[in-house]
Each structure stands twice: as C-alpha cells, then as structure tokens.
Image (cartoon, rainbow, N blue to C red):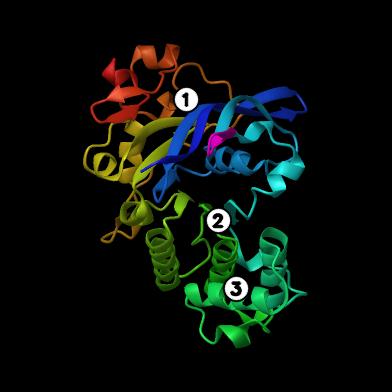
Amino acid sequence: MSKILEVKNLNIGFNLADGFRQAIYDVNFSLEKGETLAIVGESGCGKTVSTMSILQLLPPGAQIKSGEIIYNGQNLLGFNQKQMQQIRGKKIALIPQDPMTSLNPLYTIGNQLLEVIELHQGLKGKEAVEVAIKALERVKIPDAKEKMKAYPHEFSGGMKQRVIIAMALACNAEIIIADEPTTALDVTVQAQIMEILREIKEKYNISIILITHDLGIVAQNADKIAVMYAGRIVEYASNAQLFNAPKHPYTKALLNVILDINTDTVQTIEGHPPSITDDISGCPFHPRCKDCMEICIQNDPCLKPVGASMAACHLYD
C-alpha cells in the first residue's frame, strides 16, 4: 500500500465569547491507498471537526492553529479556496451525515449528478449522462436511466445515500469521507450501504475515512481504527489489535457498552465527555476512568507505542 493522506499534529480551536478554546489536540493519522480508517468515539469527541478540516469545511469560528494535512505530497492547509474546489468532490468526496437533507429538493437526481460531473470532469451532453447512469448502476439503483428523472422526495433515505455515493464515483474520487453514513437508516439498509462502500473500495481501490460510533460497523469494515476522546486520539490500532486487545480504558469502556437483553437496559459509561469550555487537568478521561491514578489527574499522557498499538495512557508508563 502507498500512503495517500497524512494528518500531522493537527490543532484546531474555536473563537468563543470568552476567548479562544482549543478543541483538537495534536491529532495524527494516515490513510493508505485502498484502506478504510475508522474514527470512533462519543458525540462531541472531535471526529467530525478533525475530518472536515481535510476539506476546509469547518464551522464558523473554527480556526486551525497548526499542523499539516498532506494529500499526495501536498499540504492542503496551504491551499486557497479556488485550489480546494479542485480537491472537494473531485479528489476527496464527502458522504454527509443526513442523506435526507443532502440533495436539493427542487432539482432531479439527474440534474444534480450532471452538475457535479460537468464541474469536476468537464463533460456535457450524452457523455455526461452516460457517466451519471453508470454511477447510479454502480450503487445498485434499479432502472438508473429512469431514476435520473426522479426528485429526491421520491427516494427513500437509503436510496438518497446511494445517490450521494454515486456522485463520489462519478467524479472518480480517490478518498471518500463517510460521516455517519448509516445515520437515520434502518438496520437492513445500513448493511446495504456498508456493502456498497466495501464493494467500491475493493473494485476501485478507493480509500475511506469512516466516522461512526457504531463499533459493529467498525468491526466489519475498518482496517485501522483511531479512537478519539476530548479532541485527542487516545488509541490507534489495527482492527484485530483493537478488538482483541484494547489498550486504553476508554476503548475498553466503549467495547463494554452493551444491551442487556434480560433487563432491556444498556450498560453505559458513567458521566459525559467534556466540552471545550471545561477545564480538566491531566488526562481528560480521568473523571470517568476506573483505572485513574494520581498521575492521571496531574499530567495529560501522550500517544505512544503499546505493543502493536498506540495508546495515550499512564498505565503503560
């Protein structure tokens, strides 16, 4: 495999009413050609902010303080908006969280696909239509030629998600960022969407960044996994290493979040992830950690090798 994307020492914060608050701390990860990297953690842990910085699609008030995002040898953080237009969609595509609101209800599926193809491939007319139909067929949309005439409201959530994936395929993107791609979809449709992503990854050697909190999906689809907590990567490991021998207490706690079918209750992690306005000394997980020691309250651990994995935890000092 060859490295296609590398995020180095990424630090991001927000300008709030009471001043600047850091949200992402020295995040590092890489993506190989044809690989799936899953970024997991509870809501508010920094998964989406970290990955949206790759496309420079951060919310208002966000500011990248330092770091590098290297795509095919070029630092995207040095690109202006015009240069990024050549990257977004064409080279790195996004599958957003909510398929229900990702398509314009006023235009047909075909019009929206053709607009993307014309913008990123420069194709028009019959040639563009053929590319659009082929893209819809790749994501297993039946009667693709007829479906080009349909409007988004005529599609189910799962079908809309397939259209979004088709847009990425139509532009020959090398990387797909899938931000909670199965949100609001039922279990059967979730499985179908993930199967499509697996197939296009293997057939076209596409690299995927999968943002999710569903460890079942991660176990079946990811090659590497980055576990995030409070804006930090606290564990970084291969699929086999993480599920067979998790190192960080937070990772272990996530894996222990299960449904008890006898009582119909969910075993959860006590407490909540800190917000960026919370001032916590030491390891940000220590208020919720069952293995907390005195040093955890005083010092924030750095990510370091622990066997075949990487973990940020004082247990391994």
| SS class, disc 1 | loop
Return the disc, 3 or 2, that comes first in the chain's sequence: 3
Local packing at callout 2 (Cα closer than 10 Å; few below 14, some 14-19, many 20+) is many
Quadrant for the C terminus in the image: top left
| SS class, disc 2 | loop
| SS class, disc 3 | helix
Tell me, for residue 114, which label it has, or none.
none
Residue carrying label 3: 131
Residue carrying label 1: 284
Q: How far apart are marks 3 and 2 (CA)?
A: 14 Å
Residue beneath the point at 58% across and 54% down: 93
Of the two numbered discs 2 and 1 in the rendering, the one whose residue sits closer to the viewer: 2
Kindly tell me whether residue 108 is visible in this rendering: yes
Return the disc, 2 or 1, that comes first in the chain's sequence: 2
Return the disc, 1 or 3, that comes first in the chain's sequence: 3
- Residue 73 painted magenta: yes
> Which region is colored magenta?
70-74
Q: How far apart are marks 1 and 3 (CA)?
A: 49 Å
Residue carrying label 2: 173
Q: In this view, does 35 lie above or below 10?
A: below
